[in-house]
Image: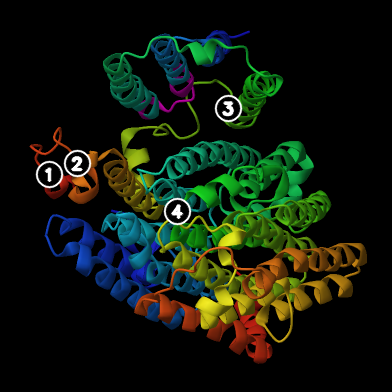
Amino acid sequence: MVDYVSTVNPDFSLIAPELALLIAASLVMVFIPWRRMPVLAPGIIMVGFIAAFAYALGQWGHQSSGFAGMVTCDNFGVMFKLIFIVASVLSILLIGQYMKSRGIDKPEFFVLIAISAIGMMAMANTTDLVVMFIGLEVMSLPLYVLAGFNRRSLESNEAGIKYFLMGAFATAFLLMGIAFIYGASGTTNLRQVVTDFNYIAAGRGMYLYAGVAMIMIGFGFKVGAVPFHAWIPDVYHGAPTPVTAFFSVAPKAAAVAVLLRIFLYGFADVALVTKAFWILAVLTMTIGNILALRQDNVKRMLAYSSIAHAGYILVAITVGTQEAISAAIFYVVAYTFFNLGAFAIIALLETRMGAQSEFSELAGLSKSAPWIAVLLAVFMFALSGFPPTVGFFGKFYIFRAAVESNFITLAVIGVLNSFLSVYYYLRVVKTCYFDDVTEAQKPVFVPATVGLALIITTFGTIGLGLFPQQLLDFTRQAIFAFL
Amino acid sequence: MTLDYAIFLISAAVAVFGATMMIMQRNPVASVLYLILSLVAQAVVYVQLGALFLGAILIVVYAGAILVLFLFVIMLLNLRSNPELSASLPPLGWFTKVAVPVLMVVELYFVVDRVIWPPVPTGIVGKNPDFGSVETVATMMFTDYMYPLQLTGVLLLVAVVGAVVIARRESAEPRKTTASPDNRNEQPIDTVAG
């Protein structure tokens, strides 16, 4: 009799955050028929997220792998787990009021968010391509449903279908890429692929490169890099706004986590990869920013701006040094706060009847809701990268890392793009403060949950902007033990 | 040319033919039938590789259960050839139609070249006589691949939840907005849908 338990090493402490969330989600699912569930569901899921957060914090600093090498627990993964949890919690805080105003407050919503987060954690917490793929699917499937959650809205349905089709397309590429790599190397574990890299590249180089290219395309879709960005504006615009807030941060962070792991840990030696990422980064930044300039809808503008921000992160991936990776993680953390903050305010304004989040609706916001206008301005300044917000330091660290590694052209293009983005972000501020009010402003009611989300995001945006070094040290530790 | 090789070539050709015909058909029922043909041919390839269990599963689960279910759904929905589908495809559509199968063929060639020939020169029996047996697959699944297997369980669970959310009847949503004389008498299925 073979002792399977000790060879497999099913160490459940490695996946404790995932398990906590799964238990919370299952509890909600089992008791959905119960009449009080719509009230209790957010609470139960929140407790799950808090437990997951605590467990994830407990994993910090421990480095081990289990489940026959399928789960790898390191600081890098834990860092991203914390990001996913924060992003999910903030999105859940935004949901209540918005969903009630649309008549779609169903408990399933929280289940979908929680399970999506489980998928993301699984992706960030492994070095095995099979687990990454299944994690990606566990993450994406709830997202497709969430995009189409408002079934009475045609736009939401369109968003769901579009996201589903593009997601399936991306998945096909990714799966083919994994098959190529498996065919070339006979293993799906990145650690093994790296160990045998030169041997495999010598014999089956073409197939290996084809696999790498396809994986790149697959995750290009997920991150929203430019030749693969076409789905983003419609999906972000059509989906319910708190869902868009979730989309713009959490799945992107998950895709970035996997990209960092595959391409920096796995295929760091492939020179073509750097070149491909260089082109992707430049295209993504430039086209995202140029298209954002022309938008008249704030939600659409933020969709294009999220493409541009993916471009800045791709700059860091292109550079690929230790410094750049920690800058990329820093940027993801920073982006989580200020982007969710911006979306929180858009969602809040959309709870007013008939609001479509057009630019014109913002006129006079400084009079009708001065505090909201101030916060919106703070988030816009952060998005465009003004000091002392954390947005400035995010960009600064990435471009500094680029210059230090002699990617001068890339850094210059990035900085020029940031200047370009100032125009459309400040247009929001200008509309709030200086545009003539054409119609009577409806008052803005701030529910406690949204208020809490705004406090957290503002604290993150400004607090981390005042003490960026602490966060940078934290992200440096995250890659210190990059398994 | 050995018999194995000939069988492989025939089944591979049939698989690619079935897959190609599947996307060329305008009638969804014919599409599904071609997909079944393709899957059966793929099962032959699996069996040749020595993966008997996987080959059987492919036929029993995919061709037998899932695609027959597809067939039922399509027939119940009464989808005849869709006039919008018969409109001529834009160039990009044709490009996709050609490029993706070509990629698949390249992949197939390469997987066969790498995975079949070097380790399994005779085609049918590998180094390990247990290769592809139920026991081997089960052992792999519940030891090395236990974590992905459990994760797949979560995937199926969320697929069910998602399907319920999407497919639940409108009457389950708040009455105040959807109430009309037509659906007033319907039972709210909210309570059983979870």
- Please state the total of marks drawn on the protein image: 4
- Point out the frontmost of discs 1 and 3: 1
Q: Is residue A161 above or below residue A12?
A: above
Q: Which residues are magenta?
A: B44-53
Residue at position x 33%, y 21% from top? B70
Tag on residue A31? none
Badge 1 density bin: few <14, some 14–19, many ≥20, Cα 10 Å:
some
As measured in the structure, the alpha-carbon distance from the residue carrying label 2 to the one carrying label 3 is 55 Å
Using the image as rendered, state which of residue A465 and residue A23 is in the foreground: A465
On screen, B147 above or below B105?
below
State if disc 2 and disc 1 touch (CB < 8 Å).
yes
The residue where tag 4 is placed is A139
Label 3 amino acid?
Ile
Q: What residue sits right under mark 1 in the picture?
A: B188
Q: Position of residue A222 (x, y in %)?
A: 59, 50
What is the spatial separation of the Cα atoms under label 4 and label 3, in whole angstroms?
34 Å
N-terminal of the pair, mark 1 or mark 2, is: 2
- Residue visible at 56% across and 45% down? A234
Mark 2 vs mark 4: tell me if same chain.
no
Chain holding disc 1: B
Chain identifier of the residue bearing label 4 in the image? A
Give the alpha-carbon distance from disc 2 to disc 4, as whole Å. 29 Å
Q: Which percent across, then down, holds residue A8?
A: 39, 60
The answer to whether tags 2 and 3 share a subunit is: yes
Evaluate if marks 2 and 4 touch, with contact meaning CB atoms under 8 Å apart.
no
* Whether residue A249 is situated above or below residue A58 in the rendered picture: above
Q: At numbered mark 4, what does the secondary structure look like: helix, strand or loop?
A: helix
Circle on res. B171:
2
Q: Residue at x 62, y 49 (%)?
A: A219
Q: In this rendering, would A452 be left or right of A24?
A: right
Which image quadrant: the C terminus of chain A? bottom right
Which chain's residue wears label 3? B
